Image: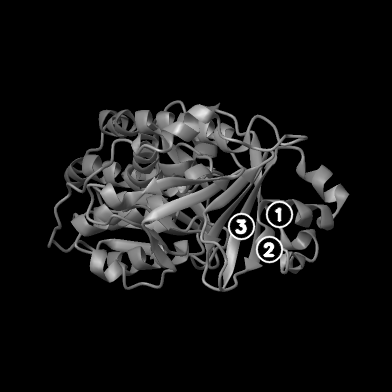
Amino acid sequence: MEAASLSPGTCCILGGGPAGMMLGYLLARAGIEVLVLEKHADFLRDFRGDTVHPSTLEVMHELGLLDDFLKRPHQQQLRQVRARIGCDEVVLGDMSNLRTRCRFMVMMPQWEFLDFLAEQARRYPTFHLRMQTEVTGLIEENGRIAGIRGNTPAGPLEVRTDLVVGADGRNSVVRGCSGLAVEDVGAPTDVLWMRLSKHAGDPNLFGYADRGKALFMTDRGDYWQCGFPALKGVVSQMQAKGIEDFRTGIVELAPFFRDRVTELRDWSDVKLLTVRVDRLLQWHRPGLVCIGDAAHAMSPVGGVGINLAIQDAVAAANILAGPLRKGAVSAGDLGKIQRRRAFPTRLTQRLQEQIQKRLMGRGFVNAGPTRLPWSLRLLERTTLPRRLRTRFISVGIRPEHVKTPESRTRASIL
């Protein structure tokens, strides 16, 4: 078995998603020796969120990376997010009045975002990224997590470190091995993902909701990445009715897809995302802490899961950099991360639930035409609802700011 022992004051991060890569970059920038393990060979995964929120762009600005980041390929910079709910077109968010450096949202494929973070992190000799490394278990000694076990193409791997960070997503192996208790908040729907080609003149709306159904769309240049929520347990019934019935449902929501919905030849062209909404009762134990979806799996509503993951990473770096530098991370230090981020997580999950009910109603079967209540239609003529939604989606609750200084100290290389 290949074994690697990181020197005192080091960190091993499991998962190369937004939370893991951002934390890895921030710690390496602060002079902390950090190893990020990612099970895939690259970051190219489809049907991931593409939204880079103004709060994340603010972090990029604070790090001095914003200009270079905006040079990476991306589809557009959205200043308004619009949707059609029944017969009403609603501005879900208007970022023109935000008090941030960037008053827009960037639509960038997540692999571009992760590649950029990896590229910037490699500038620091204390940063190490190992792809195709799948974690299989945790090493526990005297009641403390002391490292991880994993598999690589070259064989088994064992890493010992001062701190293990679980950032391996909603299906986290780390939290499954940790014994940490999970509270299932409940997700009423899963999401069916698909591609449909984009034509000139297509409406530039984020989504459509009517008759208890919804369709959400992300611009990927020459095609739309589309998400169609479906009640849990209903997908098999939809499949039994046939792909033609599903196509009809899409056209009812977005008639402009009529001339290309046959691109969905059969159900193999539709991918199922099993949605989980949960959170750990306690995010940490000695030698281990979880962040991002590993600590709290979010609903895809609003695309705010990425935002929460980035904010977790910034808060974790702010709290951990000092103790890691001293080689003494205490349970109290790990508890500070949860105390800092638990309230935004709980409130965001609650707001996501309310938004889903508002957009899609209480049921998906035999629902009548959607119509906003007159009181809401009247309120929508003011800026208050728009400002509240914009704040929630674009900035989030309790946004974090980078407090870790850039270190010029060179540490040893693995």
**Nearer to me, 409 or 150:** 409
Query: Residue drawn 36% across and 52% down?
Result: 53
- Gap in angstroms between the C-alphas marked 1 and 2: 8 Å
| Mark 1 or 2, nearer chain start | 1
Q: Residue at x 44, y 68 (%)?
A: 75
> Is the Cβ of the residue at disc 3 closer than 8 Å to that at disc 2?
no
Q: Give the amino acid at mark 2.
A: Phe
Residue pointed to by mark 1: 250
Task: State the residue at coordinates (60%, 49%).
Answer: 208
Q: Secondary structure at mark 1?
A: helix
Expressed as whole percent of the image width and height from the top left, the position of residue 122 reads 29, 68
Q: Is residue 401 visible?
A: yes
How many other residues sit within 10 Å of disc 1, few (<14), some (14-19) or many (≥20)?
A: many
| Sequence-first tag of 3 and 1 | 3
Rendered image coloring scheme: one colour
Q: Would you identify the image quadrant in which residue 16 lies?
A: bottom left
Q: Are marks 1 and 2 in contact (CB under 8 Å)?
A: yes
Depth check, front residue: 379 or 244: 379
> Mark 2 = which residue?
257
Residue type pointed to by label 3: Cys
What secondary structure is found at the residue carrying circle 3?
A: strand
Reading the image, the residue beneath label 3 is: 226
**Which amino acid type is shown beneath numbered disc 1?**
Ile
* Quadrant in the picture for residue 126: bottom left
Residue 233 location (% of width, % of height): 75, 37
| Disc 3 to disc 1: CB gap under 8 Å | yes
Image position of 367 with respect to 248: above or below: above
User: Image point 61% across, 57% down: which residue?
Assistant: 226
Q: Is residue 339 above or below residue 271?
A: above
- Of the residues tagged 3 and 2, which is closer to the observer? 2
Which quarter of the figure has residue 26? bottom left
Q: On the picture, is 355 further left or further right than 8? A: right
